[in-house]
Amino acid sequence: MIEIRWHGRGGQGAKTASQLLADAAFMSGKYVQSFPEYGPERSGAPITAYNRISDERCLIHSNIYEPDFVVVVDETLIESVDVTSGLKEEGAVIINSSRSPDELRGSLKGYRGRVCAIDARKISMDCLGSYFPNTPMLAAVVAVSGCVDREQFLSDMETSYRHKFAKKPQVIEGNLKCLKAAMEEVRG
Amino acid sequence: MSIRERLSGNEAIATAMRQIEPDVFAMFPITPSTEIPQYYASYVADGKVDTEFVCMESEHSALSACLGAEAAGCRAVTATSSAGLSYMNEILYVAGSMRLPVVIAVSCRALTGPININHDYSDSMAERDSGFIQLYGENNQEVYDNYLMAHRVAEHPDVRLPLMVCEDGFITSHAIENIELEEDAAVKAFVGTYEPEHYLLNVNEPLAAGPYGISAYYMEARVAQAEAMKRAKQVILDVSADFEKTFGRSYGLFESYMMDDAEVAMVIMGSSAGTAKACVDGLRSRGIKAGLIKVRVFRPFPGEEIAEALKNCRAVAVMDKSEGFSSCGGPLFAETASACINLDKRPKMIDVVFGLGGRDFTVKAADSVYSRLLDIASGGDIGPVYSHLGQREG
């Protein structure tokens, strides 16, 4: 079983990203859980979402305290939230940042595992012309965690986009480009 | 053929409702159940269902509208949570006494205060004496399956009682997990159409619905209702057996998990039971004889059957996810302990109140309860019979 914790800010779509990851894993034949941790919902407040991905149905329904992977959708959170709390050393933290993994490591309260960086803003602006960090972060976590086969992921996502954006086919290509670019450009 | 899907608990319930296609859905939104009428409204707008969908001005009115529809001879449903269920309180009792098999989906949420949107059973437990049958599910699959069985149980001529299908707010209602859905036609065939024996729109049989019950009649009405609740137990078992024959998934009044030779056991409900099962698996792998009873049917309470299942245990923890302020334990403990009172040999029993207002329940927390039970089972001091788990000190 792979356990993933997402850190984002209300309105950025961390919950949606965790649902998209669950979708991708589901399509590849896995058992999935995707759930947010709810509090008073305020735009911009720190929020957490979770994924469990497994070959068997997941019995556990608690939050995740010792994740295999952590995804940080908003870089500014690493100043105020202990994002690597409980993160397994053989796992990785994936941060949306233009900084290098070595620079980021200094802000991570001594985490000794793998630190990955992905400039989701740049990729999103280049491929989509506007800032949607979800798509590149989703591709980055698939690339780093290996929780879903890369080729299968891309083909499943294409099917999903063709269905989801049936009335807006012009955005399909940009999103696919975004996924591929993120898988190649994730550093660390 | 089952359909492999991934849905939240709320969407699973809305899907079951769409497949059953009730005559009336009267609603007033409240977190975390709001998505159920929200999904259903889209089915109505898309022409997928032929249901009278009524937006009311309160939960009290929403349930009243359901009662009117049921009395007229329709199948009526609603969904609610927390204060919404409390606001229905007066009408819940009316539904029970009028013997109207309305079905309410409850996304269980804490009651105020302090105000809180997260999960516990304060809302549904507060209505345990309202005359509703209550079914609880561990995950989206069980909630969906309970919903497919709900109308058949409630409408059965031996029962004719209202019913709540309870899911854990957010933990189940908003978590997306795998689920096996059944085909629309198979669901419709299983649930069948509602053919009430007596109803207001039957011109051949004029009748009064919900009249005043003077002292000479009130008690007879209440006893008849109590007898119907007793009969509901067998009907639930019969419908569950037919469900297993039709769709392959097996349900009883409760689930016994590793109970055959269990020396210590938990009695627990809902999603926390899954987490506790993971803990039992760990204990079993170390040779510890731990087990678990997950209560699916809280009303009618399967007291005799649970006592039978617990009688050979040495120590039992009843896990209450609501605080009843009785000062000696929560509602599940009161039921379980009284069910065991006439056993010749009975286990030591403690009550643990946990998970209030969304306080997370982990495998580690479950493990701490089993550790305490093992200590009691080996002759240790029972300690406080009624205690709380997971709160900060001070």
Image (spheres, rainbow, N blue to C red):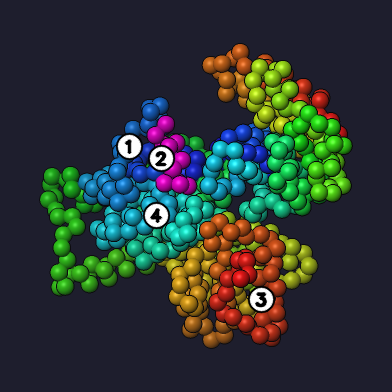
In the rendered image of this protein, does residue A38 appear above or below residue B367? Answer: above
Badge 2 amino acid: Pro
User: Residue B37, labelled with which disc?
Assistant: 2
Q: Label 4 near label 1: C-beta < 8 Å?
A: no
Q: Callout 2: residue from which chain?
A: B
The residue depicted at 30 percent of the width and 38 percent of the height is B54
Sequence-wise first label, 2 or 3:
2
| Residue A141: x %, y % from top left | 75, 35
Q: Which residue is mark 4?
A: B83
Badge 3 amino acid: Leu
State the separation of the CA atoms marked 3 and 1. Answer: 50 Å
Q: Secondary structure at mark 1?
A: strand
Q: Secondary structure at mark 2?
A: helix
Disc 2 crowd, CA 10 A, few/some/many (<14, 14-19, 20+):
many
Magenta residues, start to end: B30-42
Badge 4 amino acid: Ala
Mark 3 and mark 4, same subunit? yes
Q: Which residue is mark 3?
A: B373
Disc 4 crowd, CA 10 A, few/some/many (<14, 14-19, 20+):
some
Q: Is residue B29 visible to us here? A: yes
The residue depicted at 41 percent of the width and 40 percent of the height is B37
Mark 3 and mark 1, same subunit? yes
| Residue A153: x %, y % from top left | 72, 28
Mark 1 and mark 2, same subunit? yes
